[in-house]
Amino acid sequence: MKEKGFSQAVIFDLDGVIVSTDEFHFWAWKRLTEREGIYFDRWINEKLRGISRMQSLEIILEKATREYGVADKQQLAAEKNEYYIELINSQLNPSYILPGVMTLLPCLKRKRIGIAIGSSSRNALLILEKIGLDGYFDVVVDGHEIEKSKPDPEVFLLAAKRLGVPAENCLVVEDADSGVEAALSGGMSVLGVGSACHHPKATHTVPDLSKISVQELIDLIGSGKTV
Ligand code: G6P
Ligand code: MG
């Protein structure tokens, strides 16, 4: 494989960091749970942030009043994904890119900092295409390529390996508690944004990426310090 030649990198989670897909996930799960007569609300939805589709379903089924077998679960997960993709295909566009993203990304590229996506989603490539960022990142690792979901660091370690950058020279940007844990256990510093903007263990936190400059972001790489 060709060496990419980066000495530092930033690995971005996708959903809730680069793009706002939260509502689409919520409405797809809501449609499924209403049909199945399973209680579901926004508080339960919050627990699904960063968690794989099947693990999300397991959390949702904690409120079910009947047992679901393996085949039933696969069917339900597939149906949720159909509902989700319907929403993504009909509604997702570049206006869903989150604040600050399109300022920081080109600056990082200009400074020769590697940029990657490390996402649990199996729809990452479709989402990147819908927001016009397919082919933009140096590396994309998604839910198809990992065995263990966040908080396991697998997705970030694989991204770092593909970038050719040691973990200690990578910064992860995450909105999920599970993702913050994953980054830290992979030996990377982590910027918590959105729902993780008060995470006590994050290296630094901001409400969204418009609240941090490219230099402040770079200073967090491998530092473990706060800006
Ligand atoms: C992201 C979202 C999760 C979602 C997961 C899997 O991490 O934050 O809420 O469950 O991706 O998404 P998928 O698109 O594969 O169903
Ligand atoms: Mg996320």
Image (cartoon, rainbow, N blue to C red):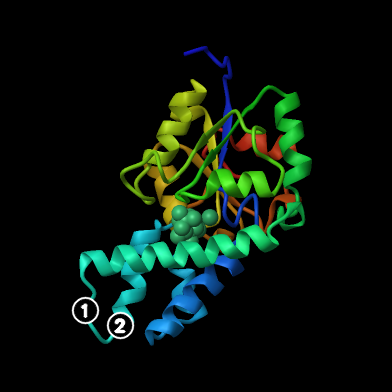
Dot 1 surroundings within 10 Å: few (below 14), some, or many (20 or more)?
Answer: few
Q: Position of residue 133 (x, y in %)?
A: 68, 40
Q: What element carries label 2?
A: loop
Distance of label 2 from label 1 (alpha carbons): 7 Å
| Residue at 68% over, 58% down | 92
Please tell me whether residue 148 is drawn above or below residue 3 in the rendered image.
below
Q: Name the residue: 54% across, 64% down.
A: 84
The relative height of residue 104 versus residue 98 in the rendered view (above or below) is: above
Q: Could you say which disc has been placed on residue 153 in the image?
A: none
Question: Element under label 1?
Answer: loop
Q: Which residue is drawn at 52% across and 12% down?
A: 2
Choose top left, top right, bottom left or bottom right for residue 193. Answer: bottom right
Mark 2 sits on what residue? 64
Quadrant including the C terminus: top right
Closer-to-camera residue (169/223): 169
Image location of residue 225, percent across then percent down: 56, 40
Residue 67 numbered mark, or none: 1
Location of residue 115 by image quarter: top right
Kindly check if marks 2 and 1 are in contact, taking CB atoms under 8 A apart as contact: yes
Label 2 CB less than 8 angstroms from ligand 1: no
